Image (cartoon, grey):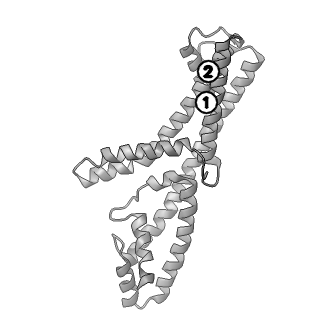
Amino acid sequence: MTVIDGVAIAGGAVLIVVTLYDVFQSVVLPRPAVGRVRISTTLVQTSWDLWRKVAERPGKLQMREAALAAFAPMMIVILLILWAAFLMLGFALVFSGLHDGLRPQPDSFGTTVTFSAGTMLSFGVGGIDAIGVATRVLTIVEAATGFGLFALVISLLFSLFNSFQRRETAVVALDALAGAPPSGVQLLEHCAADNMPEQLQATFDEWQMWTVDVLESHLSYPLLFYFRSSHDNEAWANSFGAVLTPPHW
């Protein structure tokens, strides 16, 4: 094994570990990683700043809203692609360093990347087989990693959309009392006009639990902050503000 092979193996191993660690923090860890570097979170925040500047250029409100609403779903797809690409590249670097364990040996690094992609996505590439012990183990690990990555991303999608649905259900239900856009004054006037003090108390209790749920879910999955409300004249932050207003009266 040459020095170049050793550097390729070390670099690939580092890339794999860093990517898996980011996936673990973003999907598996049930709490925000305070004081730690989260690559995906930094990427999302930077992308949002750029996307918002571009999306706010159109003159029509509907076009701006559509562009802003597309950001969060688009970032989920981008994160999946980036995680998979970094893992494929990392394993390709390791395979490149262990090229003696592959038959026939790849004629270029591009072929090695293709072999790595085929291993992760479970399809054969160019008749290349792993004959060494290390490369055989590595192909099994990569195949399992690819399966696990896509399973985790699917679970992330379910978690995100379930949390989004719970958040928006309370927002839509508030329309009947606070209007759209929501107003704390209208909430008070409506309950007073119809003599419904118990409804007002029930609304406060419901939104107290809503606050706990949103705080927990949005800190665990920061991407939820970028999911915009799906109904016109409604935004979950505005609805929360409307409910907070009445206690000061």
Q: In which quarter of the view is residue 9 placed?
A: top right
For the residues bearing labels 1 and 2, Cβ distance under 8 angstroms: yes
Q: Residue at x 49, y 63 (%)?
A: 167
Q: Residue at x 49, y 54 (%)?
A: 224
Instruction: Residue 136 in the image: state x and y as whole percent.
Output: 73, 20
Residue of label 2: 93
Is residue 186 depicted above or below 173 in this figure?
below
Point out the image quarter for the N terminus.
top right
Residue nearest the viewer, comparing 81 with 52: 52
**Left or right: where does residue 146 sit relative to residue 193?**
right
Is residue 20 depicted above or below 183 in this figure?
above
Q: CA distance from mark 1 to mark 2?
A: 9 Å
**Left or right: where does residue 102 sit relative to residue 228?**
right
Judged from this view, the residue extending furthest toward the right is: 133
Residue nearest the viewer, comparing 170 with 245: 245
**Left or right: where does residue 143 sit relative to residue 183?**
right
Question: Mark 2: which amino acid?
Answer: Leu
First reached walking from the N terminus: tag 1 or tag 2: 1
Q: Residue at x 41, y 71 (%)?
A: 241
Q: Residue at x 63, y 55 (%)?
A: 31
Label at residue 234: none
Residue of label 1: 15
Judged from this view, the residue extending furthest toward the front is: 35
**For the residue labelled by badge 1, is the local secondary structure a helix, a strand or a loop?**
helix
Instruction: Residue 135 in the image: state x and y as whole percent.
Output: 72, 19
Q: Residues within 10 Å of mark 1 (few under 14, many from 20)?
A: some
Question: Mark 1: which amino acid?
Answer: Leu
Residue nearest the viewer, comparing 177 with 10: 10
**For the residue labelled by badge 2, is the local secondary structure a helix, a strand or a loop?**
helix
Observer able to see residue 31: yes
